[in-house]
Image (spheres, rainbow, N blue to C red):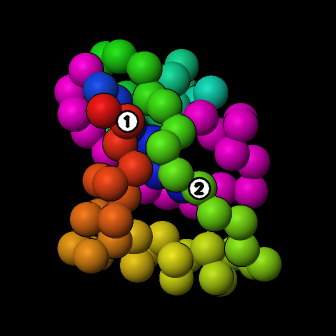
Amino acid sequence: YAIYNKEHNKIYIGQTSNLEERLELHNKKIFNNSYTSRYNGKWVLIYFEKVNNRTNALVREKQLKSFQGRQFIKKCIPR
């Protein structure tokens, strides 16, 4: 999944088995000292994919964090 913070123009890419819960945790800043907890403002979901297992999720996360993957994700940011 990829989430976006408009206030700081920041993107976070990750993987989870429960996307709804994870997005709530990001916005409540539950993850102490995490990347998303450093920034005020709301994180919104801009992209997600479903995969068969965690191994595939980790591979896809790595792809999305690459230069080409980030270019793809940037196109998903609402204007």
In the rendered structure, does residue 11 fall within the stretch colored magenta?
A: yes
In the rendered structure, does residue 19 fall within the stretch colored magenta?
A: yes
Residue type, numbered disc 1: Pro
Quarter of the figure with residue 24: top right
At horizontal 46% and vertical 51% (from top left) the residue drawn is: 2
Secondary structure found at label 2: loop
Q: State how far apart marks 1 and 2 are (Cα).
A: 14 Å
Residue type, numbered disc 2: Phe
At horizontal 71% and vertical 66% (from top left) the residue drawn is: 50
Q: Mark number for residue 30?
A: none
Q: Which residue is mark 1?
A: 78
Of the image marks 1 and 2, the number of the one nearer the N terminus: 2
Looking at the picture, tell me which residue is in the foreground, 54 or 11: 11
Q: Which residue is mark 2?
A: 48
- x, y (%) of residue 4? 38, 37
The answer to whether the residues at label 1 and label 2 have Cβ atoms under 8 Å apart is no
Position above or below: 52 against 11: below
Looking at the picture, tell me which residue is in the foreground, 18 or 29: 18
Position above or below: 11 against 43: below
- x, y (%) of residue 76? 40, 50
Q: Is residue 39 visible?
A: no
Dot 2: within a 10 Å radius of its alpha carbon, few (fewer than 14), some, or many (20 or more) residues?
A: some
Quarter of the figure with residue 21: top right
Looking at the picture, tell me which residue is in the foreground, 71 or 20: 71
- x, y (%) of residue 61? 48, 70
